Image: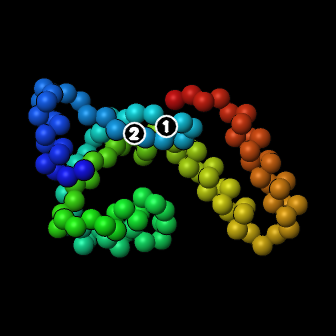
Amino acid sequence: MTAKELIEQLSKVAPDTEIVGGMFNGRVETYTVLDELHVFFYDDIYNDFFGTPGTFDDKLMTIKSEKVVYLGSFFESTNKRVMEDRHFVWQLRKVLRQHRSKEWKKEQLYKLLTEFDGKDYKR
């Protein structure tokens, strides 16, 4: 989306209309209020797209504008549950990267998954 397209869409709503975006809350896709906006030179953030392979990154590589606008949310860094779930994913990766037997990894992963599944999802 270009700034022109965004301005066009925003001109159709009242200026005090809240803006929300999509967010993975650690368990499901949901919505979040957008809290921040930053303007970056594309060349300043271009290198951040390497090392995180995916289709989304391929599209980022095709940006032609000199600057980009980032809209974001503080949700991921302020929601305790999301932080815990990120830690859980880190733990899974840690087990998988260890030079141990498949049986040991299976036991550790099962233990982590059972613990994860047993937690109630509360804010």
Closest to the observer: 53 or 112?
53
Left or right of 94, for residue 87: left
Q: Quadrant of residue 7?
A: top left
Few, some or many residues within 10 Å of mark 2 (<14, 14–19, 20+): few
Residue at horizontal 80%, vertical 54%?
108
Closest to the observer: 30 or 76?
30
Indicate which disc residue 29 carries.
1
Q: Amino acid at mark 1?
A: Glu
Left or right of 61, for residue 12: left
Q: Secondary structure at mark 2?
A: strand
Q: Is residue 81 visible?
A: no
Question: Which residue is outermost to the right?
Answer: 103
For marks 2 and 1, the one nearer the N-term is 2
Residue at horizontal 19%, vertical 65%?
65
Residue at horizontal 65%, vertical 29%?
120
Residue at horizontal 56%, vertical 49%?
86
* 2 in relation to 13, above or below: below
Few, some or many residues within 10 Å of mark 1 (<14, 14–19, 20+): few
Contact (Cβ within 8 Å) of mark 2 with mark 1: yes
Q: Amino acid at mark 2?
A: Gly
Q: Secondary structure at mark 1?
A: strand
Image coords of residue 33 (percent x, y): 32, 34
Closest to the observer: 3 or 18?
3
Left or right of 79, for residue 27: right
Q: Is residue 1 visible?
A: yes
Q: For mark 2, what is the residue?
A: 22
